[in-house]
Amino acid sequence: MTVLIAIPIFRVGCKVEIDRGRSWSVVEEALLWAVARQGRTIAWLKEQADLPHQIVVGALARLMQFRLVEALVSENGASFKASAYGLRIVTGGDALPYFPKRFSKRVGFVIEWATGEFFPTSQITLMSPYKLDQERRGGAEIRQLNVSGGLPPMSHSANLNRLADIATRGWDERIALVDGRTATLHDNEFMIVKVIDGAPRGLPDTTGPKLKALVDEACALPTGTKTMSVSYAGPREEDEALADEHPCSFDHSDIIIGGSQQRECFEGILQRAHRRVVIHSTFLDAKRFEVMSEPIRAACVRGVRFDFLWGAERDDDTEQKNYRAALTIAKMIRNDRDLRGRCTIHLRSTGSHAKLILADTLHDGWIGGVSSCNWLSSPFQSVELTALLRDQHAVADVAEALRHLVGRRGLYDDLATEMAITAIDLRRMPSGKGIDRVRVLIGEEHDRFMRVASGAAKRRFVVGSNRLGTTARPGALIQGEVAASAHVPATVLYSTTTGPVKNRHARALAEQSAEAGVRLVRTKKIPLHGKFVAVDDDEIAVTSLNWASASADPDFPWGEIGVQIRSEGIAAAVCNQLEGIFPMLKEGASASTEAVSD
């Protein structure tokens, strides 16, 4: 007896470009290190490494092919020494250069709905509902699986991982590009498993036991059974989170504080950019973009490509206002011969309040910026805070965050794929070895950080927020009270009230907080737009989250993004600099005093 088991599937297809190239072996890297400072003969290298002659010769030949090693000829014979290029790589700790060959191919795969397994399209038989009905009318015994209780994850990351498994072969291949224009997704087809006398035909060799068991169960049903209901038994969408903290050596000068200093930082990043810059700003302002267009244009002339993202989505009016600004900026780009073809302004809001910048450099890897500054709308007059990340694993988290912000369309989004591949490449870099620690915060991780920090504070607990709103108590003041209960000086600094909270409410809240040992201080002439938390002397968080007026959305963790930094003296240095701008921040100072400029 022949039975056809019909399993609903997603079918995904796209064109990919793959880099194929042999990675460097530990032997080649060891030999390069051995000849870094002094010329060595083949005999010496063979003896010291205890390797066969042909392996040493082959490794040296490949190192010379890529100009990492050069031959030195003298009266005593030939020796080998690292070239200036090779020495720079060894002493700088950079990865050895990778020169792959690139080729393209069309890749297709299916994800079955019952257990979430995926297979290359070429390994299975597909049928449309129409074809399935034809077979049924022709007398075929067909049993269709109806799946409830969930479906396989179809996020950008899930499909990119599947694509990498299917499209690449071995360690020498990696996906370099996914052409989003060629991506297709179908969800109205069935994977057909033909069972003849109890023996399934057409199941790929990689099929797991869960799917095999479902096929056997469906086949064992009485003749004439048309459907079989099953509950989804595969992987679920993973919780959206980034990696744990990264060890590194953090330079305190990479915390940028002030208004005009943010512009200098922004222009400095663009001047150092080599090929790529991605900027995410909550708001857009066409006039401010025009003012900032000169450094952007200069970078474009050097060959840098830009993507500009925005996230304003508070209400329809705000979103429409920024959408109109995006259209105006798009027109400016289109009419400028230097910007045209190099700059892309995205017309769809990401819905995120994050402020991020990502750029590559020629010799120093990638730089990631996590900020409170709206890069594409700010006049750079308020006091902002930006943390520049240079550890490549931490920067990979910034790239991953950008992928999540733009990856709602799955493999259709080229920028999301680019950011995912960039993050993968950066995580291949060696981990940092410093004593400092950096961690990118998303969503409700901000709340966890605040709870832990307020309970652990021993010397100081300072919260900076642009606005004071209805969430001030649960968002910042209660945490301050926890710190104050342990006799730790606690201060919450803000610039303006928002929503239903008026000045009289703020004064009353300040009086209540003072009774609990928390100073609620409002800036005067100089506005604070920065959002930060300083804990004791050695820990600080810089973020987009207004601690005293907003909370992270648990359903959209990428709506608020910050960075937690632990480094000796960093919080003390930041607070000292802020006290120079806002004297009322000092313990015991009058709230009516303030510096004249930032």
Image: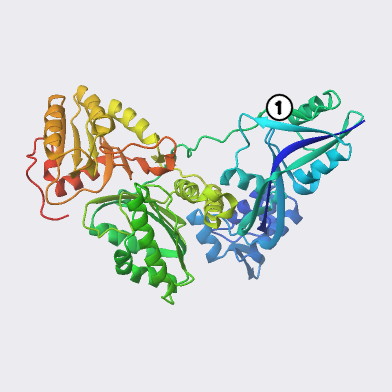
Q: Exactly how many numbered labels are in the figure? A: 1
The residue nearer to you, when weighing 584 against 82, is 584
Can you say whether 512 is above or below 182 in the image? above
Residue farthest toward the front in the current orientation of the protein: 137
Q: Where's residue 453, x and y in %?
A: 31, 30
- Mark 1 Cα shell of 10 Å, populated few (<14), some (14-19), many (≥20): few
Quadrant in which the C terminus appears: bottom left
Q: Is residue 249 left or right of residue 421?
A: left
The residue nearer to you, when weighing 435 against 409, is 409
Residue corresponding to mark 1: 229
Q: Can residue 282 be seen in this view?
A: no
**What's the residue at 56%, 36% (across, down)?**
237
Which structural element holds mark 1? Answer: strand
Q: Is residue 81 visible?
A: yes
Residue type, label 1? Ser
Q: In this view, does 129 lie to the left or right of 161?
A: right
Can you say whether 221 is above or below 71 in the image? above
The residue nearer to you, when weighing 375 against 33, is 375
Indicate how the structure is coloured in the image. rainbow
Q: Where's residue 161, x and y in %?
A: 62, 45
Can you say whether 298 is above or below 415 in the image? below
Quadrant in which the N terminus appears: top right
**What's the residue at 24%, 30% (across, down)?**
473
Q: Where's residue 228, x and y in %?
A: 74, 27
Q: Where's residue 498, x and y in %?
A: 22, 42
